[in-house]
Amino acid sequence: MKKNIGNIDRIVRVLFAVIVSILFFTNVITGTLGIILLIVGGVLLATSFMNFCPLYAVLGINSCPVKK
């Protein structure tokens, strides 16, 4: 797997996952929407640790800086 997630993208993904987790476990967001957002946050967190996003690969997006 070739790295296709840059540092800023990784930070945004981790922050989103942390914020959604905090909101879910403090019962600010509940129900089906809360569960869906928690799953999306988990996927974003996993892809940020792997530095690879399969959706980016399919769409041809690369947020990594270009190496010279």
Image (spheres, rainbow, N blue to C red):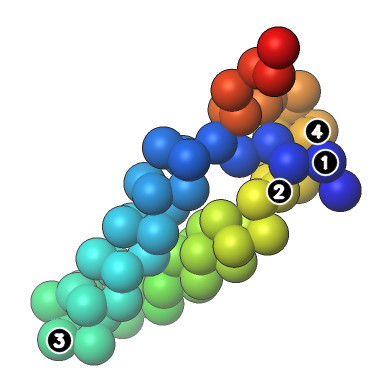
Residue 26 lies in what quarter of the image? bottom left
User: Which badge, 1 or 3, comes first in the chain's sequence?
Assistant: 1
The residue identified by callout 4 is 58
Helix, strand, or loop for circle 4? helix
Q: Position of residue 31 (x, y in %)?
A: 31, 81
Find residue 65 and report its horizontal and vertical position in percent.
59, 23
* Amino acid identity at mark 2: Phe
> Of discs 1 and 3, which sits in the foreground?
1
SS type, badge 2: loop
The amino acid pointed to by label 3 is Thr
What numbered label is drawn on residue 2? 1
Structural distance between the alpha carbons of marks 4 and 2: 11 Å
Mark 3 and mark 2 lie on one chain; the one further toward the N terminus is: 3
**Few, some or many residues within 10 Å of mark 4 (<14, 14–19, 20+):** few
Q: Secondary structure at mark 1?
A: loop
Tag on residue 51? none
Q: Nearest to the eye among marks 4 and 2: give it.
A: 2
